[in-house]
Image: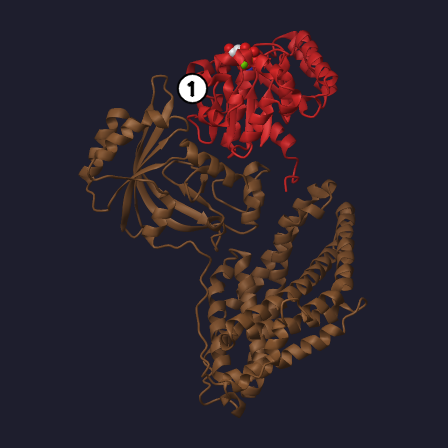
């Protein structure tokens, strides 16, 4: 992308890129600060009087912008300030957002900035990830013609609970005027309390505030090979419930589709764990738990389907004919209202006490006095057996798929694959890492193929339903929808026709027989 | 990077005024913008308070390090300027010396293409070898046109020139500049805008003293008279340009 190149070329010319920060430690006194003001006053003209405000750093919940090397900041010091998009490694200003509050990127008018952000941002929401209190002043260094040569920001930051984070004197020369600013910098650098340092404000600030910009951490959790079968399964289910809880806040506020997505994965894992655990659990626990998590799976489906449609809406524009683009706004509005309804339904359940009890029942399953005889077996033995059975079933079903197989056969196969994948995923700790990883990779390729098929089914069904619900006055939109849906039918058929050869490749991958080997091994006796 | 050239055969029609204000609006929209003052008179540089002198002169067309070093930041975020230099008056010789295929202007522009989202060229008046280069490398050539019969004839000549030299790769658009509603000829010509589609943007930049004040403030119009009639006209012009560059939804 353009931003990368801009950074590398600008870096060496010492132009707009070279940022100069003078740091002082939080113990610096007001007198120190005033001294700098006086010092600056000699060469600098005040640009802005002392100001206080709150400074915010926005990102998606999983820090997608930061991961892509950008940060988006807004300060309330400058009235009606815009959001500034910067390169988070060197601080270069990449653009300013005309919107006051960052919102979905698709609401930006078409522009280079939007183009740059679209792949990163998707339709995900932006959150104010960190807030800092900020105070400071600004000076401008100008030449005789009144041309701005550099700005000096004296800024100090504190957490909103009052903790002082530090102060920065940031001299930002205009591109091409670095030389004329040099003498001023040198003089300031000699001041004993100040240290010249090159760095990026936001990275320093985040570090000072103890925030690590990273995707939400998965709770780490280790299985022990000594565990009993029931113990291992229960621990894993409890772990998945923790993950569900972590996503709930984001779902209630419908902040980002990612939360629901992770939530659903956890629900599905629990469901497949339950299936696995059936012979280990007393039926009075198993039956209601199965029903409860099945209910959750169904409940979240409409919301996820809407999310998928909206996500593809942005990325999948390529296949929409140009003439139909004006209708998209209408479609988008429909999809959004559907999504809002789906999330509303979800919220109503998540906030009930029945829901909490449902989770707790499974979390508090005490395996030491409430499991079947089989449950006391060694975890490794039990899981190896289960994996073998699941693999055999997958192979049997996969071999049966042909070019005319009904959709349901492919869906069923996908579910088998998923079950196997979840088991391997959850209990990876019980197997040698190299073998599990190879097996998972192999399985993932198959699942992606089947997943594409499934996505096409969901979207197509959705489009046809929408088409059927249109008024007569919206025929043009209807024709477009049908056209797109027909295209999807074709794509699906193609996937179906290619399936048996790809399944063959799955069974006999070029590099060893990882999955087959893992499932055929007599690992049970190894412990 | 999109290249927008402000060009006309006639002098004093508002090229520089439009170049400075449009570049300012581009930067304000959040895009990294470079204004290249190709006119040895250096009016754009003057408006942005940058000295109209470039180290290396027209050598910057051949040496990318000189080119990059010549760029100056302006007082406004995201807006940079490549200042004018007196040596540009001999740009013709420079360009004539080269064969068409490795046009040094085009090469320089290509070198900058990752650093900026928009490049605005403020061209000197006249039809010359430089104009040919500009027609060849601009995405949009924008011609400020005073609503007079004579000016319309000149516009026609530019169109013919482009055709004759096969320089129709770039798009050409015009807009009414320094329009005076009190003048009968201005009024009558502007009333016939429908017949001039799609060549003529439906935008009239009025003749107003607030525009001339740019020379006194040495700053874009919007910084000292936002919301004024001229500023609003430039807003509309900018919107039209963006719509041309980025047809709805087609940017992905
Ligand atoms: N809309 C307007 N209203 C009033 N004065 C204007 C307007 N537009 C331009 N002017 C004035 O007309 C003069 C010429 O304008 P400008 O420099 O923009 O034209 P130009 O086409 O760049 O000229 P040149 O060919 O000399 O480069 C300037 O003094 C400018 O202030
Ligand atoms: Mg000019």
Q: Quadrant of residue B109?
A: top right
In the rendered image, the quadrant that contains the N terminus of chain A is top right
Q: Is residue B75 above or below residue B209?
A: below
Q: Foreground: A150 or A367?
A: A150
Is ligand 2 closer than 8 angstroms to the Cβ of mark 1?
no
Q: Is residue B26 visible?
A: yes
Residue drawn at point x = 55 percent, y = 82 percent: A523
Seen in the image, is A79 located left or right of residue A466? left
The residue tagged with tag 1: helix, strand or loop?
Answer: loop
Q: Residue furthest right?
A: A404
Residue sitting at x 62%, y 24%: B102
Question: Where A293 falls versus A445 (above or below)?
Answer: below
Question: Of all residues shown, which one is farthest toward the bottom?
Answer: A373
Picture colour scheme: by chain
Instruction: Point out residue A314 in the picture as x, y percentages from the top left corner.
Output: 62, 48
Query: Alpha-carbon neighbours of circle 1 within 10 Å: few (<14), some, or many (≥20)?
Result: many
Q: Quadrant of ligand 1?
A: top right
Locate residue A415, reporting x and y percent. Answer: 65, 72
| Image spot of residue A423 (x, y percent) | 57, 75
Give the red chain's letter. B
For disc 1, the marked residue is B50
Q: Is residue B235 visible?
A: no
- Left or right: where A134 falls relative to A345: left
Q: Is residue A379 left or right of residue A458?
A: left
Q: Toward which corner of the image does residue A449 lie, by quadrant?
A: bottom right
Q: Colour of chain A?
A: brown
Chain label for disc 1: B
Which x, y percent locates residue A315? 63, 49
């Amino acid at each position: 992308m353009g931003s990368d190149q801009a950074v590398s070329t600008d870096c060496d010319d010492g132009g707009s890129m070279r940022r100069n920060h003078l740091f002082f430690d939080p113990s610096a006194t007001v007198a120190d600060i005033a001294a700098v003001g006086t010092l600056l006053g000699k060469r600098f003209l005040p640009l802005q009087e002392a100001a206080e405000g709150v400074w915010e750093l926005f990102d998606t919940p999983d820090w997608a912008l930061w991961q892509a090397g950008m940060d988006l900041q807004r300060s309330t010091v400058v009235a009606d300030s815009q959001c500034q998009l910067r390169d988070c490694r060197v601080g270069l200003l990449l653009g300013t957002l005309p919107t006051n509050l960052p919102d979905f990127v698709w609401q930006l008018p078409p522009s280079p900035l939007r183009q740059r952000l679209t792949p990163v941002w998707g339709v995900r929401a932006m959150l104010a990830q960190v807030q800092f209190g900020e105070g400071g002043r600004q000076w401008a260094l100008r030449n005789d013609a009144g041309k701005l040569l550099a700005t000096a920001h004296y800024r100090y930051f504190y957490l909103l609970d009052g903790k002082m984070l530090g102060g920065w004197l940031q001299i930002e020369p205009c591109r091409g005027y670095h030389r004329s600013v040099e003498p001023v910098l040198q003089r300031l650098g000699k001041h004993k309390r100040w240290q010249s340092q090159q760095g990026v404000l936001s990275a320093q600030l985040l570090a000072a505030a103890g925030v690590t910009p990273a995707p939400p951490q998965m709770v780490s959790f280790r299985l022990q090979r000594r565990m009993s079968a029931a113990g291992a399964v229960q621990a894993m289910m409890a772990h998945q419930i923790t993950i569900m809880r972590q996503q709930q806040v984001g779902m209630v506020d419908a902040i980002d589709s990612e939360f629901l997505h992770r939530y659903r994965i956890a629900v599905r894992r629990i469901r497949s764990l339950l299936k696995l655990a059936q012979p280990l659990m007393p039926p009075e626990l198993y039956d209601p738990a199965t029903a409860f998590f099945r209910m959750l799976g169904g409940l979240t489906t409409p919301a996820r389907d809407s999310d998928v449609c909206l996500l593809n809406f942005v990325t999948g524009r390529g296949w929409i004919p140009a003439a139909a683009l004006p209708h998209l706004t209408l479609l988008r509005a429909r999809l959004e209202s559907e999504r809002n309804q789906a999330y509303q339904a979800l919220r109503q359940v998540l906030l009930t006490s029945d829901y909490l009890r449902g989770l707790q029942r499974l979390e508090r399953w005490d395996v030491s006095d409430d499991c079947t005889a089989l449950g006391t077996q060694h975890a490794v033995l039990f899981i190896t057996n289960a994996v073998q059975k699941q693999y055999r079933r997958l192979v049997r079903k996969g071999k049966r798929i042909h070019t005319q197989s009904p959709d349901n056969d492919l869906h069923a196969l996908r579910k088998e694959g998923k079950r196997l994948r979840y088991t391997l995923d959850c209990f990876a700790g019980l197997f040698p890492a190299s073998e599990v990883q190879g097996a998972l990779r192999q399985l993932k390729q198959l699942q992606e193929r089947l997943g594409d098929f499934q996505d096409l089914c969901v979207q197509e069904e959705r489009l046809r339903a929408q088409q059927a619900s249109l008024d007569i006055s919206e025929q043009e939109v209807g024709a477009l929808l049908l056209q797109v849906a027909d295209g999807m039918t074709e794509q699906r058929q193609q996937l179906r026709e290619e399936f048996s050869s790809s399944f063959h490749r799955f069974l006999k991958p070029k590099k060893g027989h990882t999955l087959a080997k893992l499932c055929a091994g007599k690992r049970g006796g190894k412990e | 990077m999109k290249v927008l050239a402000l060009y006309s055969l006639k002098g004093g029609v508002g090229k520089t005024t439009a170049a400075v204000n449009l570049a300012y609006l581009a930067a304000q929209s959040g895009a990294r913008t470079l204004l290249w003052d190709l006119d040895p008179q250096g009016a754009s540089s003057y408006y942005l308070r940058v000295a109209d002198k470039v180290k290396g002169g027209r050598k910057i067309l051949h040496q990318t390090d000189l080119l990059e070093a010549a760029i100056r930041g302006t007082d406004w975020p995201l807006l940079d300027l490549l200042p004018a230099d007196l040596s540009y008056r001999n740009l013709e010789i420079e360009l004539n010396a080269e064969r068409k295929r490795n046009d040094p202007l085009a090469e320089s522009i290509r070198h900058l293409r990752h650093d900026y989202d928009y490049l605005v060229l403020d061209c000197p008046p006249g039809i010359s070898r430089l104009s040919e280069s500009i027609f060849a490398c601009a995405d949009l050539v924008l011609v400020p046109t005073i609503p007079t019969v004579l000016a319309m004839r000149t516009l026609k000549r530019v169109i013919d020139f482009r055709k004759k030299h096969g320089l129709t790769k770039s798009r050409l658009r015009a807009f009414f500049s320094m329009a005076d509603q009190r003048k009968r000829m201005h009024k009558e010509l502007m009333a016939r805008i429908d017949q001039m589609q799609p060549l003529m943007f439906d935008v009239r930049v009025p003749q107003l003293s607030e525009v001339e004040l740019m020379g006194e403030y040495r700053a874009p119009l919007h910084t000292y008279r936002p919301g004024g009639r001229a500023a609003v006209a430039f807003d509309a012009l900018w919107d039209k340009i963006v719509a041309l560059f980025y047809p709805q939804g087609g940017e992905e």
